[in-house]
Image (cartoon, rainbow, N blue to C red):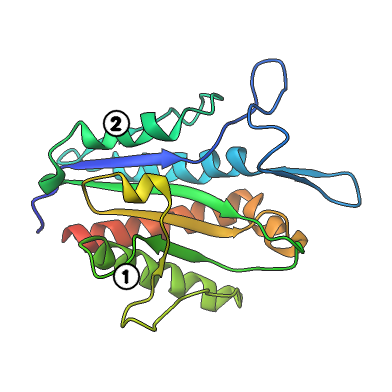
Amino acid sequence: MKNVTNVILDFGHGGIDKNGNYTTAPSKMFKFPNGEVAYEGVINRQIGGLIEIYLKAHPELNVITTVKATDSRDISLRYRVSVANAFDSSNTIFISVHSNASRNHNASGFSIFTTRGTTKSDDLASNIGEEVKKMYEKLHLRLRFDFSDGDLDKESDFYVLRKTKCPAVLLECLFFDNWDDYQHLKNPEFQKEFAWHAYKGILKYLGIN
């Protein structure tokens, strides 16, 4: 079992406030031709909040969120990083939950990101990615992995990955601006199953049965 006691969960972007307004508008949202609107931050909170519930069943883990799943605020990237960096990097991991988008609104699939090069985050990404793979292959959903450097994660300089001191990954569950992907993302049963597989990947990384 790894010497990790702190799990920081980050739900990307904002939610819907008490007045019905999306706090990240007009960014991170997409209106489909039929008038339905997908809000990335809402999806991130729904899925991330389930991962939080599953992890909190383990009293040996200190599960912290950068923002509550019920909180609509779109907090700064700097604040999100500061939450993670307030803990000892040797016994902390950081998971940021997102949904993706593309310029032509046709891209699809799941990705998991780490910073560039070989890092301590790669093992965390591989464990989560392998668990999500089991689910996505069953549903015939695309896996956007990059094995060019020997592991499945994609690499990027996302601020929340680059600035955190502990192992950190960013999940892009599916594409919220792709109609077919969105049908999965908004489905409560899909959300539960995705959260469960991500949770199982985290446990596998931690060495918890």
Nearer to us in this view, 15 or 86? 86
Q: For the view shown, which residue lies furthest in the right direction?
A: 34
Nearer to us in this view, 183 or 6? 6
Q: Residue at x 49, y 66 (%)?
A: 111
Question: Is 61 rendered above or below residue 206?
Answer: above
Question: Which residue is tagged 2?
Answer: 83
For residue 39, which quarter of the picture? top right
Task: Say what amino acid the circle numbered 1 marks.
Answer: Ser
Circle nearer the viewer, 2 or 1? 2
Task: Say what amino acid the circle numbered 2 marks.
Answer: Val
Nearer to us in this view, 191 or 44? 44
What is the distance, in whole Å, between disc 2 and disc 1 at their CAs?
A: 24 Å
Residue 55, position as x, y percentages in the image = 30, 44
Q: Residue at x 8, y 51 (%)?
A: 3
In the structure shown, which secondary structural element does the residue marked by tag 2 occupy? helix
Question: Which residue is tagged 1?
Answer: 126
Mark linked to residue 165? none
Mark toward the start of the polypeptide (2 vs 1): 2
Q: Residue at x 68, y 60 (%)?
A: 102
* 67 left or right, relative to 20: left
Residue 197, position as x, y percentages in the image = 41, 61
Image quadrant in which the N terminus is located: bottom left
Residue 16, position as x, y percentages in the image = 65, 27
* 157 left or right, relative to 20: left
Residue 103, position as x, y percentages in the image = 73, 60
Q: Residue at x 70, y 32 (%)?
A: 25
